[in-house]
Image (cartoon, rainbow, N blue to C red):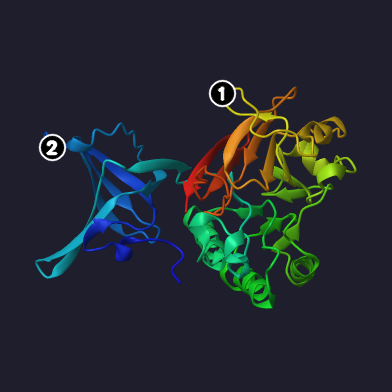
Amino acid sequence: MKLMFTRDDLPRNDRLSNPITVLVREVSPSSSNKLDFEVTVEDAEGHTISLKIWSTHSLSLSLTEGHRYELEDVRGRYWSQGGSRHYQLDSTKDLTVTELGPDDDTATRLLIVGDTHVGYRHRRRDKKAKGAKDLDARNRFQAVMDQANTLDADAIVHAGDIFDHVAIGADRSFVIDALNSELNIPFYYIYGNHDEPASRRTVDGATNDTSEIERLSKNGESVGGTDVTLFGIDYSHDSFPGESLEASVQSVLSNANVLVVHDTPYPVRNENGYHIHQKRGADFRKAIEQTSVEIDLIVSGHMHVGQQGTLDEFQTPVLVTGAPAPINSGKEDNNPSTWLLRVTESGIDGITRHPL
């Protein structure tokens, strides 16, 4: 399976079915009133492609030479001329461009995800979300790993419910085999309410076999030297957060301390000032109150609709991962996606959402 969408994956003349990551080499104004500008880009394998931004699409874009971008809903095409094949990318009215930073970017980049629910296919049909009756979550787990490679992430952070509660041995083997054979970056995780004992034993056993699979705890795990310290609390609901986080040298020196939990985010307000969810057992403020560690971001799994907010009283940013598959049982579309967190010497530099 290809890990990155590249020039060789371009269709003859159609929208790309997956995003493509490119490096902008040159941006040239166009003399034609049909074109806003022409861009020379490189794909992940260094192949040169022409990207045309058409005036008819009325896009407001600013592309910087030497920076990388993820292009979604872009049209690709190729044709033969003069004995060679030519490739081109074209804008569409739906084109989404996400900046990933300069090519020499030294930021630590973490791909954040939760609730992959591998094993979901074994649920009774009446227990599945309307749009997920035939879902095989193994494919979505694979897509997450592919995206981590596409976005050049330094690690994956999983906020719980790796598995569904009906996961079988084949599901557990799939996850471990995929992590061991196809992922060349660390995988950090906590457990959610669906990760049952057999599933936990499987993944915990894998942590003994490779240093690339690490379970997060209250002691903190350093990522990227001392760029980021990750803390983790497994699903604990009414007993949340339990013991306080353990202050450490790396958490003091880190550019950012991130707490990863799996519970209903409370009391967290969205950008409109409304609580995302009502109280359901866990109070995130307790984790902040009971520790001397300065938390710069709380990442929460458990809820299947991804969104961002801030924690009451402390104004700590909170990222609710959502799920990378359409398994939300409510009416709201969960927009399956992952999130890319960038941390620089100045701290958290940005969080961008990446659809799957």
The residue positioned 47% from the left and 57% from the top of the image is 150
Rendered location of residue 309, percent (x, y): 62, 31
Q: Which residue is mark 1?
A: 272
Residue 168, image x and y in percent?
68, 74
Of mark 1 and mark 2, the one earlier in the sequence is: 2
Cα separation between marks 1 and 2: 39 Å
Q: Secondary structure at mark 2?
A: loop
Image-based side of 245 in relation to 128, left or right: right
User: Which of the 4 quarters of the picture holds residue 179?
Assistant: bottom right
Q: Which residue in the structure is indicated by mark 2?
A: 34
Residue drawn at point x = 72 percent, y = 59 percent: 194
- Other-residue count near label 2 (Cα within 10 Å), few / some / many at <14 / 14–19 / ≥20: few
Which element type, helix, strand or loop, lies under badge 1? loop
Any mark on residue 104, and which? none
Q: Is residue 139 left or right of residue 345?
A: left
What's the residue type where badge 2 is placed?
Lys
User: Quadrant location of residue 57?
Assistant: top left
Q: Quadrant of residue 167?
A: bottom right
Quadrant in which the N terminus appears: bottom left
Q: Residues within 10 Å of mark 1 (few under 14, many from 20)?
A: few
Specify the amino acid type for callout 1: Asn
- Is residue 274 visible in the rendered image? The answer is yes
Give x and y (percent) for residue 355: 47, 49
Closer to the observer: label 1 or label 2?
1
Where is 66 relative to 186, above or below? above
Of residue 82 and residue 93, the one placed in the foreground of this image is 93
> Where is 125 relative to 252, above or below?
below
The correct choice, above or below, for 333 with respect to 155 in the image is above
Kindly identify the residue that appears in the image at 32 percent across and 46 percent down.
25
Residue located at (43% from left, 40% from top): 99
Outermost residue, right side:
243
Q: Nearer the viewer, residue 309 or 76?
A: 309
